[in-house]
Amino acid sequence: MMGVIFLLSLLTILPQIMAAGKQELQAVIQGNGNFTKKLYNILSEEPGNVFFSPISAHAVLAMAYQGAGGSTKDAFTKTLAIDSPLQAAEGYSDVIHHLNNVSDVELLMANKVYIKNGYGLKAAFKEVAQKKFLSEVESVEFAKTAEAAKKINLWVEKKTQNKIKDLIQPDSLSDLTRLVLVNAIYFKGNWASKFDKSQTKTEKFYLNDNDSIDVQMMNKKGKYFYKEDEKLDAKVLELPYANPDVSLIVILPNKRNGIAELEAKLAETDLTKITENMFKPEVVVKLPKFKIETTINLNKPLEKAGLGVIFKENEADFSEMLDSPEELFVSQVIQKAFIEVNEEGTEAAAATEFEMIPRRLIVSKEMHFTVDHPFIILMQTQQKLNPRRRTRMSNTIFMGKLCNF
């Protein structure tokens, strides 16, 4: 095979997304939820913090799905948990339109296809990339590796407000490179109710039952959606941004060393419905300030997730992408991610099975949510599926685990 595809997911993340209302949109949101759990479970096998944007990876892979055929197309269908390329394209058309039109926060999703000079995209793939994924298409001389890498990286920096730099290295490119597919996400939003900086104190964060470190702990009391989930053995808190359709979900295991058990239970949980059955009491919140930057080579995780065929030179089928007869395969899938949470807010380029506390049994008392041991975060946006019925689903923009600072 002579062709090479680089699928590059990049992002600077900060909360927010939403959209319209039809079957394709619901399928994409549900597919992203299933993909999120699958990829998180794989990434969390390694020790330490986890932070990634599932929707950034899901979106760029969904765009590649449009050019796949045969067993490669089948692998995308299964791994992305979407029935067809058409369903993916129609659903993401709604998602991207919404993301780029959210009020009161800065939110952007952008796609771009870089193609080798002298090559052309098949008409059908080009049309769906441009019209449904709103992707730009640009010709590049990949043989001039430094120049090509600089061009791609500058586009990424611009789209992520300079938070994601040097996504692609010159030695990743060569004269054999035919395509580079890129997705960028950027979010910046203030809390609906900011934390008072004067109340941020140095407090202990327990790494396990015995060991602790000092962190900058933000403090605030207010009315927040909250629940105690018996099946997860955890507390769940929703912190809204200036646009209430975007929020940071914090899932805190009841036990200091309960993060592994929580992860196992979340693997069987519908993340699109994690905020169901919550109530809104007065909550005393203690949340550490944090900042995370990650670079992840997703080749092995995607292989484990079921997409190994796309990396195989003699098996990958992307026959629906290029006009030329060359056979393509994926060489790399790279994601860079960034998030910062502080007193101002965040920046970061279905009936539930759970038995919740019934609302009628809630006693009006002050709750305490002290995030002083390893926890999980979800950045979600509420997508409107049917405006008339006011039905919504939560779409996960990013997911992470913080177990050290």
Image (cartoon, grey):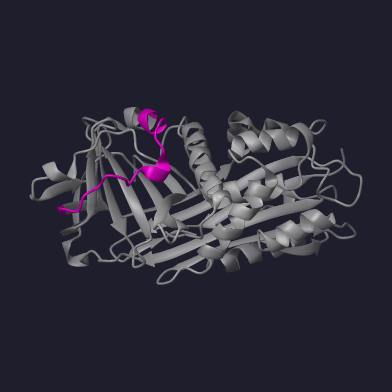
Say if 397 sits above or below 75 in the image: below
**Numbered range of the magenta stretch:** 264-283
Q: Position of residue 115 (x, y in %)?
A: 80, 57
Query: Is residue 311 visible to us here?
Result: no
Pick the residue in front: 159 or 141. 159
Q: Position of residue 275 (x, y in %)?
A: 32, 47
Residue 283 placement (x, y as % from top left): 16, 53
Q: Residue at the location (51% across, 60% down)?
A: 20
Residue 14, given in percent of the width and then of the height, sits at 43, 59
User: Quick check: 246 left or right of 45?
Assistant: left
Q: Residue at (83%, 31%) from the top-left corner?
A: 314
- In the rendered image, residue 77 lying in the magenta stretch gets the answer no
368 horizontally vs 54: left or right: left
Using the image as rendered, state which of residue 136 and residue 404 is in the foreground. Answer: 136
Q: Nearer the viewer, residue 95 or 158?
A: 95
Vertical placement of residue 298 versus 7, above or below: above
The answer to whether residue 112 is visible is yes
Foreground: 360 or 126? Answer: 360
Looking at the image, which residue sits at the far bottom?
104
Quadrant assignment for the N terminus = top right
Residue 199, picture quadrant = bottom left
Q: Quadrant of residue 242?
A: bottom left
Q: How many marks?
A: 0
Q: Viewed as shown, does residue 303 lie left or right of 356?
A: right
Instruction: Tell me the chief SS of the magenta region.
Output: loop
The residue lying furthest to the front in this view is: 388
